[in-house]
Image: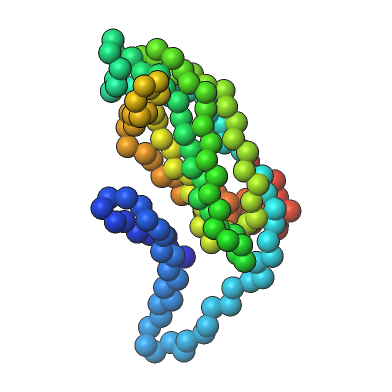
Amino acid sequence: LEYFDQYQDSTVTGALRVWVDMFSEEDPYHEVRFKDMTQVDFQMRIRIWRVEDISIFKDAGQRNDVYVKGEIQMQSAGQPPKKEVFRTDTHRFARSTAEFNYQWVVDLSVPTKYCSLELFLLDEDTFSRNDEIYSSKVVPLDHLLLMAYENERNGRESP
């Protein structure tokens, strides 16, 4: 199973999952049978500890009022698409490092059609729009969720 992000104007607008079945012309074709994929409920926990090596400053005085925003986008089989937005508190007057101790908790059913986490590092402003310090980063979570699912189905603990 292959996974490709779909872009429009350098923004991820969706995902394409592809199964490619290749065989030689001489070999008889045997259709792949996917095993029963019964949904299993999981709780995913995301911990935000620290941001290091900040080198772009949006405020005067070589500092930022930093917070982290996360957007989980997912869809489990037979469910409508779901989006959850989280954020940390604001680390005021941060220079190269910002400290946090936040845990975001997401309840989901696995396997999913797709699941990703987009992380934003932002400078909070009081009188104007908050500034993005760096471009957001999209982290696909499909593989990790599939490993947890397989471990659960096979009676093994997930790390």
**Residue furthest right as drawn:** 155
In x, y percent, where is residue 103?
Answer: 60, 31
**Residue furthest front as drawn:** 127
Q: Residue at x 26, y 53 (%)?
A: 9
Task: State whether residue 19 is above or below residue 30.
Answer: above
**Quadrant position of residue 93:** top left
Q: Residue at x 36, y 18 (%)?
A: 64
Residue 118 lies left or right of residue 63; in this view the side is right
Task: State whether residue 117 is above or below residue 26.
Answer: above
Colour convention of the picture: rainbow
**Residue furthest top as drawn:** 61
**Residue furthest left as drawn:** 9
> Depth check: 18 or 117 in front?
117
Q: Residue at x 39, y 89 (%)?
A: 26
Q: How many marks?
A: 0
> Depth check: 59 or 72 in front?
59
**Residue 52 shows up from this direction:** no
In x, y percent, where is residue 23?
Answer: 41, 80
> Depth check: 41 or 58 in front?
58
Which quarter of the rendering shows the C terminus?
A: top right
